[in-house]
Image (spheres, rainbow, N blue to C red):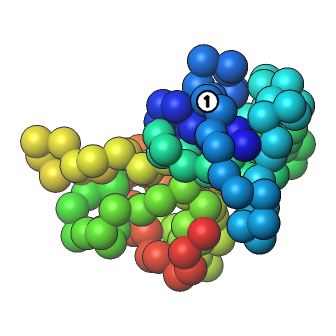
Amino acid sequence: MVGVAQPLSFGAAVQIVDLREVQLPTDTGLATIEWSEVDSVVGKLTATDLRAGQILTPDSVTGERVPAPGEAVVGLSVESGRAPSASLAPRDEVLVVTGAGRPPRRAVVVRSGEPDTTGRRGIDVLVRQADAEDLALASVDDRVAVVLVARG
């Protein structure tokens, strides 16, 4: 079976050096990829963060790039207390609240950094392209709060 040799972040292109052959019994009932099919995943993109030692599953990789047409990835700079203190993971669903009478925007976390020395954290979110400019401007103006609504 195909296993993960080293950590890969969401959206990373899979290379052969990132993978290793793993021996498993054939009757595990797990969704796996046979090592003989390893070439079918090389060059694809990770659909989530992958950790070393995991077994690669068919839904762990995708041929689709993020963002897709009609979508955008917006980098938000969020002050401490305006986002959950728990780490956000790729594919978590969030609401981005900007105030000023505007409704919250639904978004999906692409990547979330750790708080810096000032307590601010960078969070990259996938949104509709139509919402991207407003969210980016709200982040620049420090009018952003992020609410976790569902785990990916």
Q: Residue at x 69, y 26 (%)?
A: 13
Can residue 65 be seen here? The reply is no
Examine the rendered structure and indicate whether residue 20 appears above or below residue 53.
Answer: above
Quadrant of the image containing the C terminus? bottom right
Locate residue 31, reporting x and y percent.
Answer: 78, 61
Examine the rendered structure and indicate whether residue 118 appears above or below residue 37: below
- The amino acid on which the numbered mark 1 sits, given as a three-letter code, is Arg
Residue 82: which quarter of the image? bottom left
Residue plotted at (45% across, 76% down): 147
**Residue topped by disc 1:** 20
Residue 16 is situated, as x and y percent measured from the top left of the image, at 68, 19
Q: Local crowd at mark 1 within 10 Å, few (<14), some, or many (≥20)?
A: some
Is residue 98 visible in the rendered image? The answer is yes
Q: How many marks?
A: 1
- Residue 137 picture location, percent across and down: 51, 47
- Given residues 98 and 34, the one toward you in this image is 34
Residue 7 vs residue 123, the one in the foreground:
7
Query: Residue at (47%, 59%) from the top-left corner?
Result: 89
* Viewer-nearest residue: 94 or 47: 47
